[in-house]
Amino acid sequence: MRDREPPRERETLIEQAAVPDEDIDSRDAALAATGDAQAFERLYRRHVVRIHSLARRMAGSESADELTQDAFVRAWRKLHQFRGEAAFGSWLYRVAISVILAHRRRLAIHRARLAPEEWIREGTPSHEKRSEIGMDFEGAIERLPDRARRVFVLHDVEGYKHHEIARMMKITSGTSKSQLHRARMILRTAMA
Amino acid sequence: MMESNKSDSWRARLSEYLDDELDPSERAELETHLDACAECRTALEQLRRVVARAARLVLADAPPAEDLWPGIADRIHERPARAGAPATARSRVPPRLALTIGAPQLAAAAVLLVVLSSGVAWQLGRGSLSATGPAETAALAPSGNTLPAARIATHRYESAIAQFERVLAEGRDRLDTATVRVVEQNLAIIDRAIDEARGALAVDPSNAYLNRHLADAMRRKLDLLRHTTFLTEL
């Protein structure tokens, strides 16, 4: 599996952040794959901040906790597929992105089928129910249209290329580019 | 007007320019336009700031407000990491094998329940039989007593519900938490409707509307559980 390489200008910033020891991750991943939940908890503790932040930026604050848990549970079940060719953090990241993207698609389909009648009301998490978060940049990202937000986070925050985003989101590269531009043009007002 | 259109056209490509995705000739044309268009130069500078700000967001990562590990631990302890590892809780039963009532029987239970509900109400309301009634009801009506058939349908329905609920409980951890929440909320609403209809029918058993409403709610519960069980198998 190919590791995603962040843009060069971002590598220095990432090095300055807390980067998990990849050797320790690999050892804990191997232990967790045998059913060692304590080893998996150590992996969780080291990676939850990044995964939760990703979930929050891509899907909103209301879904971030659930999606973070779903991502780690999915990773637990797929540990036997982690071969160590890539850093565990990178592999976990891809699992989380897959969970987050699938969540939005599935939720839209399921809500239409699970609660079709007017007399069945569901608590629908929506942008309108978010608490006041002011005009800060992260708040502005959260208020972006869904698709534009996901593309923006994947491209400008996480460093993925348009062809990678297109494959993950099942869209064209052209759509990825236009959604990115749309997001940036909206966000520039938040920087004003 | 034409200049405005050209400006809009180039503005739409500023992100590609910023990301170095234009071919050399397009890049040269845009740069010529930027020399003459203050509005586009301003927009470009704003986009640069957005990109730079986004690149630093990773340094602003923050942990969740609550420790999410307990919820994760609960779910992973029911499913081992590898197929060969020992299960720490109940063993997994393939959903398909856990259901002993087949799809045709379930469909029959649902239809029979609905028809009987409407047939019982109709019979008690009209006090006589009619050839225009549903065929199934007409077939049952000549005996003058639909209660045994209603009991059979109810038993089949309740057996089907119990089976689905067992399979769902076993496959629950294969669903994401948001889906589980939606299903639980809707089941609670449907169960309330069923309880209310039954309570009302205890006082007014011949009420045709209440009978239909009850049958409708029970059918919806069956459909909801069937669909959710299907999702656990994906």
Image (cartoon, coloured by chain):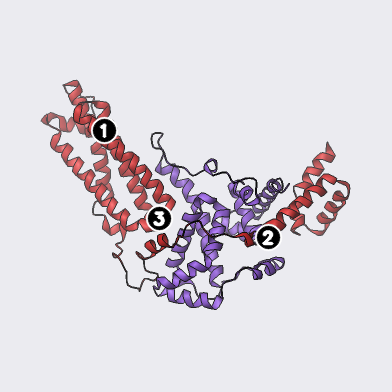
Chain colours: A purple, B red
- Secondary-structure class at tag 1: helix
Q: Are marks 3 and 2 on the same chain?
A: yes
x then y, percent, for residue A57: 58, 54
Q: Residue at x 29, y 32 (%)?
A: B213
| Vertical placement of residue B155 versus B72, above or below | above
Q: Distance of mark 1 from mark 2, alpha carbons? A: 58 Å
As drawn, is B106 to the left or to the right of A57? left
Q: Which mark is residue B197?
A: 1
The amino acid at mark 1 is: Ala
Residue that carries the numbered disc 3 in the rendered image = B175
| Vertical placement of residue B99 versus A131, above or below | below
On the image, which quarter does residue A118 sit in? top left
The answer to whether residue B205 of the structure is visible from this angle is: no
As drawn, is A170 to the left or to the right of B234? right
As drawn, is B52 to the left or to the right of B99? right
Residue that carries the numbered disc 2 in the rendered image = B55
Q: Are marks 1 and 2 on the same chain?
A: yes
Q: Residue at x 27, y 54 (%)?
A: B166
Indicate the chain on which mark 3 is placed.
B
Indicate the chain on which mark 2 is placed.
B
**Which mark sits nearer the N-terminus, 3 or 2?**
2
